[in-house]
Amino acid sequence: MSIPFEPTRSYVYRATRYELLPRIADIARAHGDQPFLLRDISKRLLAETYSQEQLDTPVKKAQSDATDKISAIFGYYIPFLAANLKVFEKLGNGMFRNISIEEEVEETDAAATDAAADDVDPNDPGVIYAYTFPSIMKASGRFPIKVGRTANNAEARVNFQCRQTCCFDYPKVLMTWDVHRVGAVEDAIHSTLEARGSKRDAPGTEWFNTTVDEIDAIVRFVQS
């Protein structure tokens, strides 16, 4: 764990959100779309990560002399944040289910407000960007990538789109391209990928099963 252990509620919150939940999500992928008991995974992971002495450490409640064990505080925060950050779908009775890639894509697009974020003219120079999430990346082959445009700062643009709690992963900008007519180039990429059957069957208009090399080849062709 990169966050130093402290017997405090704020530590449990930070450790849960930024370190334990990503590891739990990796383990839970083995369940596919089948329901699972979150506490079974979290108990096993806590036992592997902390000593029993750390888990039994008492933490005083606010405005009270009563205490809770660290393990009990984890037991509260893990399902609470898993549901509220939309890491998993909460089914009830301690049961959860993985959120499909299609649902994640839909929620990401719903969170983006393109007109307010970026008023770039389609005929002006700009930046084409391609991004995805680490949880759906592949070392080789095609995987879901979103292709969009911005006036200049692709990192800021992507972070704006993914600022909502629907996005559990930090987005990863895969590549950017400076182009002369940003709207024309974006349209060309979208049209070419759609013609090749790469458009994802999701409400979003900019997600494709593709590769950075394929997008780069289209940009180079259009620019030339």
Image (cartoon, rainbow, N blue to C red):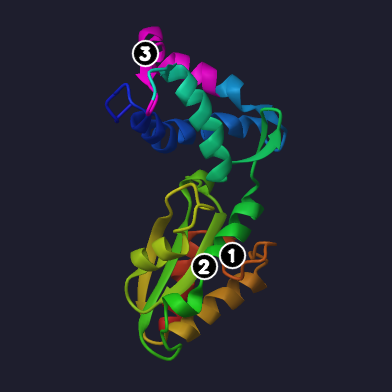
Quarter of the image where the N terminus is located: top left
Identify the magenta region: 42-63
| Residue drawn at 65 percent across, 69 percent down | 196
Q: Write down the quadrant of residue 202 in the picture.
A: bottom right
Return the residue found at the far top.
53
Q: Looking at the picture, how far across and down is residue 36, in whole percent?
A: 68, 28
Q: Considering depth in this image, is 11 or 221 the residue closer to the camera?
A: 11
Height in image: 79 above or below 48? below
At 57% from the left and 23% from the top, the residue drawn is 41
Query: What secondary structure is found at the residue carrying circle 2?
Result: loop
Q: Quadrant of the C terminus?
A: bottom left
Q: Residue drawn 54% across and 81% down? A: 187
Is 62 colored magenta in this rendering? yes
Q: Residues within 10 Å of mark 1 (few under 14, many from 20)?
A: some
Q: Residue furthest bottom?
A: 123
Give yes or no for contact between labels 1 and 2 (Cβ–Cβ under 8 Å).
Answer: yes
Location of residue 50 in the rendering, given as x and y in whole percent from the top left corner: 39, 15
Residue 148 position, x and y percent, is 48, 72
Mark 1 vs mark 3: which is more N-terminal? 3
Q: Which residue is mark 1?
A: 110
Residue beneath the point at 33% across and 26% down: 8
Q: Mark 3 = which residue? A: 57
Note whether 7 is above or below 88 in the view shown: above
Q: Looking at numbered disc 2 in the image, what kind of residue is underneath it?
A: Ala
Is the residue marked by circle 2 packed among few (<14), some (14-19), or many (20+) residues within 10 Å?
A: some
Which mark sits nearer the N-terminus, 2 or 3? 3
- Disc 1, SS: helix
Residue indicated by mark 2 = 112
Q: Label 2 to label 3, Cα distance in Å?
A: 42 Å
Q: Can you see residue 87?
A: no
